[in-house]
Amino acid sequence: MTDTSTPGAAAPRNIFKTLIAVGWMYGGRGIGMLWTLALVGKLSVGDYGRYGMGFALSAVVGPPLDNPFNVRAMREADEHFQAERTSRFLLGLTLMIAGACLIEVNYIAWFGLAIAGGEMVFKSFQSQHFRDGHPQLTWRMDTIRQITSVAIAGSYLFGVDDPSLQVASLLYCSPYLVVLVLAARRVWGHRPGVPGPPKLILALVGEMLGMCLYLQGDVLLLGFLTDDTTVGYYALTVTVTVALAAIGQSFAMTYNEPLRRSGGDLSTGPSLKHIVLLGLGTGGLVVITGIVLLLTPAPTELGVAMLIMSAFCAMRTMSSVLAVILYAQRRDVVRLSANLGLVPVKLGAVAALAQFGAIGAAIATVATDAILLVIYLLAIYRRKADSRS
């Protein structure tokens, strides 16, 4: 059913759906944090650093390839959606197979590809709910998968005397095999389709590649320039802040259908007031986390970096909402230019401040994200002002 409500009338319902999604999301994220503590406690911060670099690689590989499918799932006709969902599944399967072939070759490579492919297959399974604007359903699926992964791998970590990161990671990935079967059944009978013309595909892949290099390239670079412990601290701050900032995308998803039907008209999307309040809320939670860390025996470097990253969390939450509006407006070049253009800026800043460890990386991240937020705000709201004049 088409949602023709005004933003003010629709906001309570959309906020309610977002809160349900957040409940599921942070149930899964909470389990994920327990998994992080288990990895650090039963293995080491260094092993968590390797694990974090594997996840960083998955974020650099998977989301860029998935982005054309993800964006078009929101805004294209059902016929195209069904065909492209099949291609999405097949591409994810290919990445999973590539990861399996590298298990005995390189940990970061196999784990990164396996997670990237598994998530892409999973997204193909979830995509109908995403398209219909039901983040609470997609996050429920994510949480169930996360709980299953952690339960299986955690049983191994605490059930043997000398656990290894390799075996724990293999067990963590095992639920994706079940997802693979479920997704295969969903796409069965639909011929694959290409997600748009080549120019559009390159733009959407490039946009997300820039975003992923922007969000995860710093983890890989910091690991290269410093050590596993330092990158472990920074990876923890990224894990917490990105998890909280995902609330922004969930909130924006509740407006997918009206934004798709209106072509991104701001009157059918979230208000700027709600976007700002959401960002301040998530940033405030990270401030509290940082203060708690500083009041405990946790490393001071970690606590200070977490406090600094609270600003990143607030801005990233707002940017996530604004990005969905730009998707609906088909302003792919704006996002591509911003995300790719800021990669060398951020990585250069991280390299320059690497001597200050996780704190330096956090400062670089906050400064660069402020630029991105300004670009998005000007792109959306200056255009609105121009259209009125």
Image (spheres, helix red, strand yellow):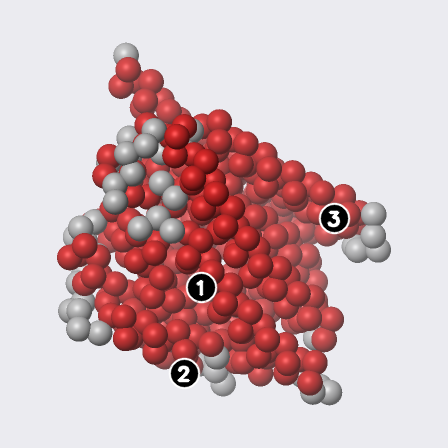
How busy is the neighbourhood of tag 1: few (under 14 within 10 Å), some, or many (20 plus)?
some
Q: Nearer the viewer, mark 1 or mark 3?
A: 1
Q: Is residue 137 shown left or right of residue 368? A: left
Q: Which residue is mark 1?
A: 141
| Cα distance between the residues tagged 1 and 2 | 27 Å
Name which residue type carries label 1. Met
SS type, badge 2:
helix
| Cα distance between the residues tagged 3 and 2 | 39 Å
Q: Where 244 falls versus 384 (above or below)?
A: below
Which labelled disc corresponds to residue 101?
2
Q: Position of residue 79 (x, y in %)?
A: 15, 57
State the residue at coordinates (41%, 66%).
119
Name which residue type carries label 3. Gly
Which of pointers 3 and 2 lies earlier in the amino acid sequence?
2
Name which residue type carries label 2. Cys
How busy is the neighbourhood of tag 2: few (under 14 within 10 Å), some, or many (20 plus)?
few
SS type, badge 1:
helix
State the residue at coordinates (28%, 30%).
265
In front of the other: 302 or 341 = 302
Q: Position of residue 274 (x, y in %)?
A: 48, 31
The answer to whether residue 106 shows anywhere in this view is no
Q: Nearer the viewer, mark 1 or mark 2?
A: 1
Q: Position of residue 306 (x, y in %)?
A: 68, 47
- Assign the N terminus to one quadrant of the image: top left
In front of the other: 354 or 201 = 201
How busy is the neighbourhood of tag 3: few (under 14 within 10 Å), some, or many (20 plus)?
many
Q: Is residue 129 shown left or right of residue 44? A: left
Q: Which residue is mark 3?
A: 303
State the residue at coordinates (24%, 36%).
263
State the residue at coordinates (17%, 73%).
189
Examine the image and state in which quarter residue 290 appears: top right
Examine the image and state in which quarter residue 364 appears: top right
